[in-house]
Image (tube, grey):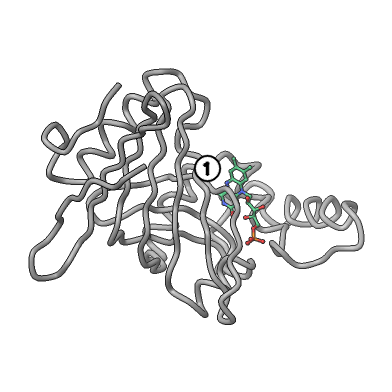
Amino acid sequence: MRLNRDAIDSSPFRQFEQWFQAATDAGINEPNAMCLSTVSREGKPSSRMVLLKIWDEQGFVFFTNFGSRKAAEIAGNRQVALLFYWEPMQRQVRIEGTPSKISIAESATYFATRPRGSQLGAWCSAQSTTISSRSILESKLSEIKQKFLNQQVPLPSFWGGYRVTPDRFEFWQQGADRLHDRIEYANSPQIGWTTQQLAP
Ligand SMILES: Cc1cc2nc3c(=O)[nH]c(=O)nc-3n(C[C@H](O)[C@H](O)[C@H](O)COP(=O)(O)O)c2cc1C
């Protein structure tokens, strides 16, 4: 499969949609799993997987705990990178951009769609803090189950979504003899999205 500048969509969002759909159609397990890299105030990078839950031309949304390490790093340095790797398609997509918290109303709408177990789990874990043992989580879960017995589980104030507004995309398609195709889209406020081909 080749990727060339004449054949790609002028919008990186539509290009992403085509590839995301192809990865979904290929039956890839969790094609929405992406590596999120953040950078601390001191310039130290860290990466972890998160799930892409909402995306459109406004950006790419994942959900997490606002007390987590990733959230602390985002608060100190608003530059992040996202990375998808779809091995059966021999493709990767790199996205760089700026995250912002989505509204409480939007987070609440998504939270309400989660299975009850995941909703309760969100309440139980002060993500990224140290715990002495797993039993702490289990007793917290029993306490929370009791607290919300016979009622809807509300959105915790410490949990919600970030929307990453992209300023750069790169679509990478594996090629023969390591001559991979790489198309970069960069956004500038004056001219919008432009594309470049990069050497592999
Ligand atoms: C496939 C996969 C998907 C994940 N999705 C999420 C997610 O959507 N949100 C989240 O907070 N953590 C998710 N995690 C857990 C994170 O990788 C990570 O352990 C956690 O968010 C704590 O990261 P931090 O200490 O850097 O903040 C996922 C892990 C895997 C392996």
What residue is at 72 percent from the left and 59 percent from the top? 125
Q: Secondary structure at mark 1?
A: loop
Left or right: where 27 falls relative to 2: right
> The disc labelled 1 sits on which kind of residue?
Arg
What residue is at 23 percent from the left and 58 percent from the top? 186
What residue is at 91 percent from the left and 62 percent from the top? 132
In the rendered image, which quarter contains the C terminus? top left
Q: Residue 79: x and y, percent?
A: 43, 69
What residue is at 45 percent from the left and 18 percent from the top? 27
Residue with the most extreme front position: 177
Query: Considering depth in this image, is 82 or 142 the residue closer to the camera?
Result: 82
Q: Residue 194: x and y, percent?
A: 14, 55
In this picture, is 110 found above or below 132? above
Query: Which quadrant of the structure image shows residue 89?
Result: top left
Crowding around mark 1 (Cα neighbors within 10 Å: few <14, some 14 to 19, many 20+) is: few
Labels in figure, total: 1
Q: Residue 155: x and y, percent?
A: 53, 59
Query: Considering depth in this image, is 65 or 2 the residue closer to the camera?
Result: 2
The residue to which callout 1 is attached is: 114
Residue with the most extreme left position: 191
In this picture, is 144 found above or below 40? above
Q: Residue 115: x and y, percent?
A: 57, 39
Query: Considering depth in this image, is 145 or 85 the residue closer to the camera?
Result: 85
Residue with the most extreme top position: 26
In the rendered image, which quarter contains the N terminus? top left
